[in-house]
Image (cartoon, helix red, strand yellow):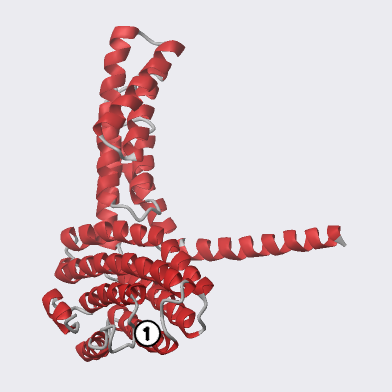
């Protein structure tokens, strides 16, 4: 029985991995095709137009610069090009003074890595600088001189940039999808907080806290990806007209980050308040109601911000809904009298200001909506 169970678990694991792998492969077809074409084109130009023999670094730098990372592609191109150039310069200089050999290669690598870390924190920059230094010491100098590799890297980077700015998809698309995802998670966190109050269950509030913490790495990755979207909108002639909108999405994602931080504080305090019975039954019901209303508004907000076809009226409706919730956030109106319960209300007020700002309301106006304490 135990053996059969183990085999079943293994088969299930393999099926899930295969399904996820197939999905990733299908979604990667456009990027893979672009990387393949750009890498071969860079190699061809470096070999036949510039006369370089076997310009592998033209192809590899194009692949690295395009890649599947969400980080800034312009930064990757610069890291590849500058790393190659500095690495070759350092390797060639040390080769002149130390000569070639195994111990010289180890010393060059060690010095190059430390210098790269001193100059920049980028992983690609460190890798390129160290690799180029090592290759200069270990491999014969190309026919065109050691810096032909640097020129090859520049060619690959230029091709990658051209592909990014001329072939890339709409820079607003990914941020919109990101907003739909993270705001959906925020709504789920608020619904769990409301359920914790409705059922007097501190464990559910703790689960909301864990959920809110778990989304932070994804938010950080999304904000990093927005840097690439801004570069495309700023430099691509096809999408330059969308720069203001992309900048607005960047500001919105920053406020979403603030809202998640506020939600974590709220969920943590709510866990304590429920455990210590700091809220009356009536107070819990009222607070659960307003948090549930806020969760529903956040779901509408996600749809309004992520759908390019949504009208300004949708966002206006969301603001009105959130404003109604905000005007109720006074401890006495919610029948909350104990200090710990009042603290929960104050923390929720902070989160509501964040949500109103995400809905494009002026911060001062959002704070003025809150009842005076």
The quarter of the picture where residue 186 lies is bottom left
Element assignment for label 1: helix
Is residue 51 something one can see in this rendering? no
The quarter of the picture where residue 346 lies is bottom left
Residue 306 appears at what percent x and percent y? 31, 78
Residue that badge 1 annotates:
287
User: Which of the pair 316/327 is nearer the observer?
Assistant: 327
Residue 240 appears at what percent x and percent y? 16, 66
Q: Quadrant of the N terminus?
A: bottom right
How packed is label 1: few (under 14 Cα within 10 Å), some, or many (20 or more)? many
Establish if 301 lies above or below 27: below
Establish if 332 lies above or below 81: below
Residue 276 appears at what percent x and percent y? 46, 72
Q: Quadrant of the C terminus?
A: bottom left
Does residue 73 appear left or right of residue 288 in this picture? Answer: left
Q: Look at 29% across and 26% down and name the residue there.
A: 115
Residue that protrudes farthest toward the right in the picture: 1
Does residue 312 appear left or right of residue 141 in this picture? Answer: left
Residue 318 appears at what percent x and percent y? 26, 87
User: Which of the pair 6/190 is nearer the observer?
Assistant: 190
Q: Look at 13% across and 77% down and name the residue there.
A: 362
Report how many numbered discs are placed on residues in the image.
1
User: Which of the pair 223/81 is nearer the observer?
Assistant: 223
The quarter of the picture where residue 304 lies is bottom left
Is residue 116 something one can see in this rendering? yes
Establish if 118 lies above or below 258: above
């Amino acid at each position: 029985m135990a053996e059969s169970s183990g085999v079943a678990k293994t088969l299930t694991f393999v099926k899930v991995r295969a399904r996820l792998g197939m999905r990733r492969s299908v979604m990667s077809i456009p990027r893979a095709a672009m990387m393949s074409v750009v890498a071969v084109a860079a190699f061809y130009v470096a070999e036949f137009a510039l006369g370089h023999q076997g310009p592998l670094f033209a192809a590899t730098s194009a692949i690295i610069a395009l890649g599947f990372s969400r980080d800034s592609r312009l930064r990757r191109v610069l890291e590849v090009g500058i790393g190659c150039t500095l690495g070759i310069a350092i390797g060639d200089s040390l080769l002149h003074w130390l000569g070639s050999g195994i111990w010289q290669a180890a010393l060059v690598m060690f010095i190059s890595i430390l210098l790269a870390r001193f100059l920049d924190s980028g992983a690609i920059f460190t890798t390129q600088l160290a690799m180029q230094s090592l290759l200069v010491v270990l491999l014969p100098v190309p026919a065109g001189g050691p810096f032909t590799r640097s020129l090859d890297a520049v060619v690959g980077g230029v091709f990658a940039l051209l592909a990014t700015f001329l072939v890339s998809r709409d820079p607003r698309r990914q941020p919109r999808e990101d907003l739909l995802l993270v705001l959906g998670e925020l709504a789920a966190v608020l619904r769990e907080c409301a359920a914790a109050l409705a059922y007097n269950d501190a464990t559910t509030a703790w689960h909301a806290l864990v959920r809110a913490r778990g989304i932070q790495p994804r938010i950080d990755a999304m904000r990093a990806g927005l840097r690439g979207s801004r570069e495309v909108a700023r430099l691509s002639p096809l999408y330059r007209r969308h720069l203001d909108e992309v900048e607005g999405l960047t500001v919105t994602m920053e406020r979403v980050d603030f809202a998640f931080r506020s939600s974590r504080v709220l969920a943590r305090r709510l866990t304590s308040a429920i455990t210590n019975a700091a809220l009356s039954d009536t107070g819990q019901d009222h607070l659960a109601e307003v948090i549930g209303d806020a969760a529903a508004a956040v779901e509408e907000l996600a749809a309004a911000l992520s759908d390019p076809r949504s009208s300004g009226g949708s966002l206006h409706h969301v603001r009105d809904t959130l404003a109604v919730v905000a005007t109720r956030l006074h401890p006495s109106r919610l029948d909350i009298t104990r200090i710990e319960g009042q603290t929960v209300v104050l923390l929720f007020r902070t989160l509501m200001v964040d949500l109103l700002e995400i809905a494009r309301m002026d911060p001062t106006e959002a704070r003025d909506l809150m009842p005076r304490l």
